Image (cartoon, rainbow, N blue to C red):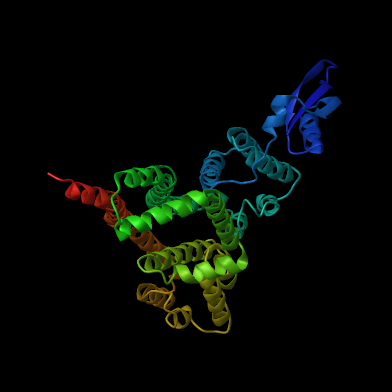
Amino acid sequence: MEFIYQARTKEGKPQSGTVEASTHQAALNVLRRHNLTVILLEEATNVGAFFKEIKWERVSARELVTFSRSFSSLFDAGVPLVEGLRILADQTDNQYFRQVILDIMDNVDAGLKLSQGLEKHPKVFSDFYRNLVKSGETSGSLQKTLLYLADYTERQYELQSNIRSAFIYPIFVIVVFIAVFLIMMVFVIPRLSGVLTQLGTGELPWLTRIMLALSRFTSDWFIGILLLIAGGIGWLIYYLRSDIGKAAWDRLSLRLPLFGSLFKTIYQARFSDTLSNLVRGGIPIIEAMHITADVVGNTVYKQLILKIAEEVKAGNTIESVVKAHEEFSPLLVQMVAVGERSGKLEEILMKLAAFMESEVDRSVKSFVPLLEPILIIILGLGVGLLVAAILLPLYSVILNVPT
């Protein structure tokens, strides 16, 4: 937030201006640290400040990557934590994230550790992120930890971006097809019906009759159909965001043809990458698995990872659990077995994660070229049926015209 202040310096000279801080008390502390005697301090209420204070309470993965990498660079350059956080707050355009960083800065300035400041914002910084920072503080390798976090967050961001990009094209084509279909049914086909009536084509072909009936239904219930589509999309989004809906989708996604193996690879890569980074950061294996279960992003794998944690706590090996479930590939089972026997589990998992991420990237890149001809065939069939329904009665009229 922005505050307007009036103050006096140590020499008694008046000074006024604005100061950025998360709270009124934080702004007061900033001014006092600059040896100013505060006379007036109030929150800015002008129109510009009002719009600046509009917050979208969301921090994107890209912003978190930039924050982590910049913070690592500042820390490596010897910039104090508080000053580094102030610089990062000034650089971000996301007002919500800006206030989060300023609040962390105030907490660190008040004597708390960085990890303790991050714990106050669990929506922005995950358990994985906070625990690695805590581990870095304990081991004295915070700069390396921040660099690991930047690399990890960037890899996850790129992976999600590639997957999202692969689905943009088919979704766009499907939406355009539905829009064109509705326009044809509501505005074009009814006019064609009048033309066919004037031509006196006799009994229309069955395909044309079906198309005209569908057009009449769509025209009569056009608003209802739009509301039904919008309501269906809204309900689907709400359902998938609920615990029951998410669990159902997580189970279904792993069994989808073509996509199921891709999703399994994604979650196994995330499991390997997250667990390896946590173990490498000094987090105990049981605690690391509980954090990984929350980070992996799929309820099926979450339950499996929690089961692994229980088995390991009971004295069993990770291999003995993962090989009993088809959700884990034979490659992961073998690599885990090698890692456990050699005592280099985190290194093996890191290499496995890199390999699986490259496999996902290759699969996604080959997915779009494979999908394009399938969509073209489907669209071609739809257009062919529509054209046939229009041309068949016209062709019949031409044949019946006396020569």
Viewer-proximal residue, 30 or 378? 378
Quarter residue 67 falls in: top right
Relative horizontal placement of residue 43, taking residue 73 as reference (left or right): right
Viewer-proximal residue, 116 or 202? 202
Query: In which quadrant is the C terminus drawn?
Result: top left
Relative horizontal placement of residue 368, taking residue 142 as reference (left or right): left
Name the spot of residue 347 as percent of width and height, x first: 42, 65
Name the spot of residue 401 as percent of width and height, x first: 18, 46
Query: In which quadrant is the N terminus drawn?
Result: top right
Depicted 304 relative to depicted 150: above or below: below
Q: Is residue 151 visible?
A: no
> Which residue does the image show at 40% across and 52% down from the upper left?
174
Depicted 47 relative to depicted 195: above or below: above
Quarter residue 285 falls in: bottom right
Depicted 75 relative to depicted 212: above or below: above
Q: Residue furthest right?
A: 39
Name the spot of residue 249 as percent of width and height, x first: 51, 67
Q: Is residue 298 visible?
A: yes
> Which residue does the image show at 60% across and 69% down from the upper left?
244
> Which residue does the image show at 31% across and 52% down from the upper left?
386
Name the spot of residue 182 as percent of width and height, x first: 43, 48
Q: Residue furthest front?
A: 402
Viewer-proximal residue, 209 or 52? 209
Viewer-proximal residue, 172 or 253? 172
